[in-house]
Image (cartoon, rainbow, N blue to C red):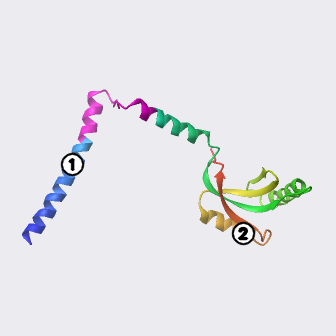
Amino acid sequence: MKTIISTIFLIVAVNIFAQSNAQNIFVKLSAENGGKININQSNEIRLAMEKQFSSIANLKGINGYRIQIYFGNGKNARLQTNQIRSSFTTKYKDAKAHVIYDNPYFRLKVGDFRTKVEANYFLKKIKLDYPEAFIVEDIIDVED
């Protein structure tokens, strides 16, 4: 029993010492360099990081959810999409409506929801007006 307690005490003490020692290293490094820490890395890592950052910057938004309320094609699909969009934005002024044309289909998706819970809440709100509506994963706009 004493051995188990001693072992646990030793593990806890080593863990606390290691954490405080790591923090002290950064404090010491930043004090020696006037508050600056230099990180040396290979050129390949730098290029990979730049590529990742640029691909994130090129995205028009973030992963999220929208609600698709219309899907159609044909001669009058554009007109019908715009009519549905107009009636939607009149009734639900706070929600954005997005017309997407993916040849030959027109889609009308509404909202910019970060979570499926938020999208589901809004879906329940509009389900009487748009019974065929459903949630889709999409790249959503990010408010500045």
Q: Which is nearer the eye, 137 or 45?
A: 45
x%, y% of residue 80? Answer: 88, 58
Picture quarter containing residue 56?
top right
Farthest residue toward the left?
2
The image quadrant where one finds the N terminus is bottom left
Q: Is residue 31 magenta?
A: yes
x%, y% of residue 28? Answer: 24, 34
Q: Is residue 115 magenta?
A: no
Give the extent of the magenta segment. 24-46
What residue do we see at 13% from left, 63% from top? 7
x%, y% of residue 57? Answer: 58, 39
Q: Secondary structure at mark 1?
A: helix
Disc 1 marks a residue whose amino acid type is Ala
Disc 2 marks a residue whose amino acid type is Lys
Farthest residue toward the right?
75
Q: Which is nearer the eye, 32 or 44?
A: 44
Disc 2 residue crowd, few under 14, some 14–19, many 20+, Cα 10 Å: few
Query: Which residue was labeled with disc 2?
Result: 125
Q: Which mark is residue 18?
A: 1
